[in-house]
Image (tube, rainbow, N blue to C red):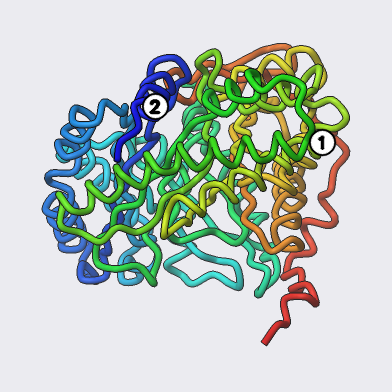
Amino acid sequence: MLDTRDILETIQMIRQENLDIRTITMGISLWDCVSDDADRLCQKIYDKITRSAEHLVETGCAIEKKYGVPIVNKRVSVTPISLIAGGVSADGCLKVAHTLQRAADTVGVNFIGGFSALVHKGMTQSDRNLISVIPEALAETELVCSSVNVATTKAGINMDAIRLMGSTIKRCAALTADRNSIGCAKLVVFANVPEDNPFMAGAFHGVGEPETVINVGVSGPGVVSSAIERAGDCDLSALAELIKKTAFKITRVGQLVATEAAQRLNVPFGIVDLSLAPTPAVGDSVAQILENMGLECCGAHGTTACLAMLNDAVKKGGVMASGHVGGLSGAFIPVSEDAGMIAAVDKGVLSIEKLEAMTAVCSVGLDMIAVPGDTSEDVICGIIADEISIGVANTKTTAVRLIPAVGKTVGDSVDFGGLLGHAPILPLRTESPARFIRRGGRIPAPIHSLKN
């Protein structure tokens, strides 16, 4: 039986606390599109995406109207392109990127993910072809997103791939320098990448997924923040319980939307991703949650402990609300997309070193961080290697979305607009890790990976 108080509470969450469904993402398998002719490959990819996702956007809009819950993005993810483009050249891979853009325009989605490669243990020629044109692909398209998985706990860390990604990020920044190097905002380097993540820029359709699937990402930092503020000075056990209950309510909304979308589109329901994904809007901030928990400012000593508790409570509440939870599931800390994080950086309280420590206990990693445009490839590689090591050692997903903004330095900021927000340029340590990076090879998997 419906409870009027629950209905009113949900309405308040939507109207006053920025509750929304951040994305409905349709995953589409492209295995049946394989061809060694680039034009034929592109035509089959275009036909498959436009046929499968033909009604995705209108379905999302219909569910919005039915339940009054905003669905901010409708997206598509596809099989990692390097896996299906083995018979074509680097130029052929670039043609595929343009095809993905054309298909995304046709079906009306906000982003399309899967211009991706999985190179945690080594690289095929197809992987190298795709990675070689990532900068051009992201510069010449608006909606295409790219990701590269360079490590897993089982395989260790592919340092050759990390070195390659350092140069790729720099080229991507240069090719989009006239747009604040925004191409880098569509490129993620992963460890232990999940195959059912609905969030961009890291979404792709994994090899173990069905033909098509619906994955949903919920969002509710403002709801959690408001609940903590109303609770006052309760003890930490009570606070954890409050966060769990709030996460449960948020996730139930996501489960409802995911189930209905899957039914209407006649495709399987995959997962609900529990991640608290902030926006630049005031009050929709993970940093504000941490400050309402008792920090004077996000980045102060105690921040990592607060974030660990928040992440754990969100997961415990969310898994009770959905039969299938996956993706990243936790709390995101993208600097440019979180008004509280931006304020903490501007105050000089939140540094890249503190952000790195926080990634040991949150969902992803060093996310949407703008750094000086003259940062060297070796320093970028060192940052990636540090972050990826946290993921491998802790058997969790970590990632890096770093933006070396051309022509910008500490004290400047870059504005990307929309959900990507704006970011102050963070200072970095400039001492070089070049000798270490250039050794190449693989860092072996940790001993605790041997669990068979």
The percent coordinates of residue 439 (x first, y second) are 79, 64
Q: Give the CA separation, mark 2 to mark 1.
A: 38 Å
Please tell me which residue is depicted at 35% across the width and 42% down the height of the picture: 144
Residue 356 lies, with reference to residue 322, above or below; the image says above
On the question of residue 373 being in view, the answer is no
Nearer the observer, 316 or 428:
316
In this rendering, the label closer to the viewer, 2 or 1: 2
Location of residue 158 in the rendering, given as x and y in whole percent from the top left corner: 67, 65
15 on left or right of 66: right
Which image quarter is the C terminus in?
Answer: bottom right
Give coordinates of residue 264: x percent, y percent: 15, 49
- Quarter of the image with the N terminus is top left
Residue located 45% across and 50% down the image: 321
Q: Position of residue 275 (x, y in %)?
A: 52, 42
Q: Residue at x 49, y 72 (%)?
A: 124
- Drawn side of residue 280 relative to residue 296, left or right: left
**Residue drawn at (51%, 59%), measured in percent from left and top?**
194
Q: Residues within 10 Å of mark 2 (few under 14, many from 20)?
A: many
Q: Nearer the viewer, residue 294 or 431?
A: 294
Foreground pick, 426 / 303: 303
Residue 353's disc number:
1
Side of 239 where 99 appears, left or right: left
Q: Residues within 10 Å of mark 1 (few under 14, many from 20)?
A: few
Number of marks in picture? 2
Answer with the quarter of the image where residue 296 lies.
top right
Instruction: Give the residue at mark 2.
Output: 10
Extreme bottom residue here? 452
- Mark 2–mark 1 contact, CB under 8 Å? no
Q: Secondary structure at mark 2?
A: helix
The reply, left or right, for residue 8 in relation to residue 301 is left
Say whether residue 157 is visible.
yes
Q: Amino acid at mark 1?
A: Glu
